[in-house]
Image (tube, rainbow, N blue to C red):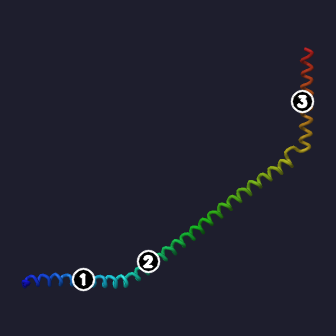
Amino acid sequence: MVAPNDSFGWFNAILAAISALAGSITGLVAGTWRVARIEPRMKLEFIRDLANVENDLRDQIEQHNRESGMRSDLLVEQFQESFAGLRRQLDEHRLHTEQKFMRKEDFRDFRDEYREDMREIKDSIKDLGKK
């Protein structure tokens, strides 16, 4: 025969097991329902935030490209001006050299002076030889 306390102990153990099982099933259902309800919202927020970050990044890249292009264009323009100025100066100096470096009259004067100087030197050398 089973003692009354013994059946009550089994009953409590079974009742505790059933309540634990019911609690875990309830927690599982509640958790699933909660995740099923919250996850799409989280997903939407994540996608929205990611799209905002992508748009901001795209805007910053476009702005950087515009500014970089403007700086490059400015540098190219400055170099073109510098090279054009140097070319102009070289051309002006070349023209000046061709036109005015040694005019015919100046060259004739130089030649006559040179001849005179050479005659004087030759005469000086002759005079040294006589002494």
Q: Nearer the viewer, residue 113 or 40?
A: 40
The residue sitting at the top extreme is 131
* Structural crowding at the residue carrying mark 3, measured as other residues with C-alpha within 10 Å and reported as few (<14), some (14–19) or many (≥20): few
Q: Which residue reaches farthest front?
A: 1
Reading the image, the residue beneath label 2 is 46
Image quarter where the C terminus lies is top right
Residue 130's label in the rendered image is none
Q: Mark 1 or mark 2, which has the lower sequence index? A: 1
Residue sitting at 20 percent across and 82 percent down? Answer: 17
The kind of residue on which mark 1 rests is Leu
CB within 8 Å, label 1 to label 3: no
Disc number placed over residue 117 in the picture, else none: 3
Q: Position of residue 111 (x, y in %)?
A: 91, 36
Cα distance, mark 1 to mark 3? 131 Å
Using the numbered discs, state the Cα–Cα distance from disc 3 to disc 2 in whole angstroms: 99 Å
**Mark 1 residue element:** helix
Q: Amino acid at mark 3?
A: Asp
Q: Residue at position x 86%, y 48% from top?
A: 98
State the SS at label 3: helix
Out of 56 and 122, give the one closest to the viewer.
Answer: 56
